Structure formats: C-alpha cells, structure tokens
Image (spheres, rainbow, N blue to C red):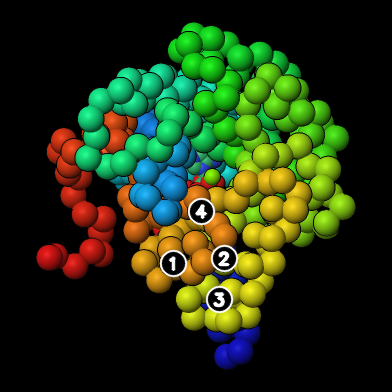
Amino acid sequence: VAKGAGKGRWCRYQSELHTAIVERLELRAALTEAVQKLSFSVEYQPIVDMRTGAAVGFEALARWHHPARGPVPPDQFIGLAEETGLIEPIGSWVLRQAVEAAARWHTVRHEATAVPVATGTPYVSINVSARQLRTPGFVGTVRAALEAADVPPSRVMLEITESLLLRDQEPVWTELAELRTLGLRVAIDDFGTGFSSLSYLQQMPADVLKLDRSFTETIASSRRQRLLVEGIIRLAGTLGLEIIAEGIETEAVRTILLDLGCASGQGYLFSRPLRDPDALRWLHGDPPADPPPPPAGTPPR
Ligand code: C2E
Ligand code: MG
Ligand code: MG
Ligand code: MG
C-alpha cells in the first residue's frame, strides 16, 4: 500500500514538474514575442519630499502586458529576462522610455501646480540588472539615451540591488564609477536585504540608499526595528549617502521616518506607480486621465 501511495505521489510530482517546465517554456516564448512586439510599458512612482509631499523624482517600473494573462509583474519576468538575455533589449527600451518621459517633466516646473513641486525638475530613477551592467557598451547606451532625449545626467539615477553590488563587485563597480563620473547618480536598491559590511558600504560607488520596504513596513509596530532604521539613517548620513525609504503606506510610518531624519520616500501613501501621462498630471495636481480599474482583490468603495 505504502509503495502504491509513494508511486502516486511520485507521479503527481512528475506531472507538476512537467507542468512547471511547460509553463516556463511558454512564458519564455511569450517573452521573446513580447520583445519583438514591444508589449511593455513603464509606470512611474513619485519619490517625494515627505515634509511637503512634493515630487523630487519618479522611479520607472517595467510592466509586461501578456496577451492572455494580462499584466505580468516585474518580479515574474525580470528573472526570466535575465536568464535568457532578453533583459538587454527590454532594459534598453525601458531606459529610453524613462529618459524620454523625464524630458517631458521638464516643462512642469514653470507652471502653476496644485501639488507642491520641489525645487528643480524631478529626476528619473531606473532599475538596472546585473546582466545589463555587464553588457559591453552599457555606459555608451546610457549616454546615447540621454543625448537623444536631451536630458542632463544629473536628472537620472540608476538603481542597483544591494545583493548585486555585493556579488559582482569588480565589473559592476567599474561601470558604476564611470557612470557617476558622467554625472548620473547611483542608488543601492533594497538596502538592508543584502549583507553589506561597513567597509564595503564606504567604498561602494553610490549616492543613495533605498531602504527596503521590509524595514518601513514594521517600523510602526516594532521599537527594535525603529532603532535599527535610526541607525541606518545615521550611518547613511555619516557616509554622505542620501536615504530614500520605500513602501510607505501609512501616515504613522511617514511621521516616524521624518522624526528619524529620513526626508525622502515613496509608497502607496503618496501614490501608486502611474502611467506616463498620469505622472505628468500628478505633478500638476490633476487626477488621472482615465482611472485604471482597481487591482484585483480591492474591496469596492
Ligand atoms: P523595487 O525597485 O524595489 O521597486 C519597488 C516595488 O515596490 C515596485 O514593485 C512598486 O510598485 C512597489 N511598491 C511601491 N510602493 C509600495 C507600497 O507602498 N507598498 C507595497 N506593498 N509595494 C510598493 P514592482 O513594480 O512590482 O517591481 C518589483 C521589482 O521589479 C522592483 O523592485 C525592481 O527590483 C524590479 N523591476 C521593476 N522594473 C524593472 C526594470 O525595468 N528593470 C529591472 N532590472 N528591474 C525592474
Ligand atoms: Mg527600484
Ligand atoms: Mg527598491
Ligand atoms: Mg524593494
């Protein structure tokens, strides 16, 4: 009997494995097609000065529109894109889109706005993956995108995850140093989830720390976490790094972060990621042109 049950389990396991492999192959084929058809878009989430609510920048976030599945979140395709090398065309496309969008934000500054606009034009912050950074000519690609859109390097930030910075130091640090020499800023994304030692942190070619959402999420309920975040904020200050907190969802969290000395942040409290024209409208204090349907699972108001 036991043997029979074991066999049944094995078969089920095999068929699940089979399904997973088939699904992955399908997703891979679909992603390849998506690159040919450019079935992607970029959304922009405001990064605000939490004291005033004014936008200081926008983070560009890639979206894939799958013909059957609908929108596929980046967590479900960036990894696959990395493995297959498709991240190069996708990443360059996102980069160009984001820089072109940033060029349009330029005009906002001179107009009357309902939402207070921070001094200076908002920058764009673009996520860059390992494989993109290691692609020969990446610096040239970035440079060309900036020149084509006529956006100065000071208005562009590149986000690199902490784990990537630790993993591929040699090749990646050199590229980043070169980009910083051009005048771009570099942010360490998801900071706190990797294991940077203090000595590394001091040497890293970076300007900004993005404090991972896992810290901000728990800050209101845990004193220990609050002390930890306070320590990170101090450390950033000592090292001359700016800090941006991610995933701020409540007023309580905003207040605590301000008390601890962190002035910049992004999160649903301020705005969800916005489609391109809506980012500009948001800057003007206007409502979205055509509100998208609420995400699945949201209770009706
Ligand atoms: P990330 O760079 O840490 O981006 C922040 C993620 O948190 C985004 O998820 C954003 O929509 C989400 N978020 C923002 N505010 C809140 C909040 O208040 N609460 C919660 N729960 N979530 C919030 P998204 O857009 O799904 O992106 C996931 C990750 O995918 C990004 O994490 C980034 O690492 C990666 N990614 C996105 N676009 C690109 C891209 O163009 N290239 C690369 N290489 N990676 C990308
Ligand atoms: Mg990011
Ligand atoms: Mg992040
Ligand atoms: Mg994160």
- The answer to which of 248 and 251 lies nearer the viewer is 251
- The secondary structure type at the circle numbered 1 is helix
Calculate the distance from the C-alpha at mark 3 to the C-alpha at mark 1.
Answer: 52 Å
**What kind of element bears circle 2?**
helix
Q: CA distance from mark 2 to mark 3?
A: 53 Å
Note whether 179 is above or below 205 in the view shown. Answer: above
Q: Is residue 134 visible?
A: no
Q: 129 left or right of 200?
A: left
> Given contact means CB atoms under 8 Å apart, are the residues at marks 2 and 3 in contact?
no
Counting other residues with Cα less than 10 Å from the Cα at mark 2, is it few (<14), some (14-19), or many (20 or more)? some
- Residue 9's disc is 3
Q: Secondary structure at mark 4?
A: loop
Q: Looking at the image, is mark 2 or mark 1 earlier in the sequence? A: 1
Q: Residues within 10 Å of mark 1 (few under 14, many from 20)?
A: some
The residue shown at (52%, 73%) is: 219
**Position of 162 relative to 275 (above/below):** below
Is residue 217 found left or right of 203 in the rendered image? left
Marks 2 and 4, Cα distance to the nearest angstrom?
9 Å
Give the residue drawn at x 66%, y 13%. 140
Q: Which residue is mark 4?
A: 263
Q: On the image, numbered disc 2 is attached to which residue? A: 260
Which three-letter amino acid code belongs to the residue tagged 3?
A: Arg
Residue sitting at x 76%, y 59%? 195
Q: Position of residue 261 (x, y in %)?
A: 57, 60
Cα–Cα span, label 1 and label 4 = 10 Å
Q: Neighbour class for label 4 at 10 Å: few (<14), some, many (≥20)? A: some
Image: 120 above or below 69 = above
Some atom of ligand 1 lies within 8 Å of the CB belonging to the residue at label 2: no
| Nearer-N-terminus badge (3/1) | 3
Residue positioned most to the bottom: 1
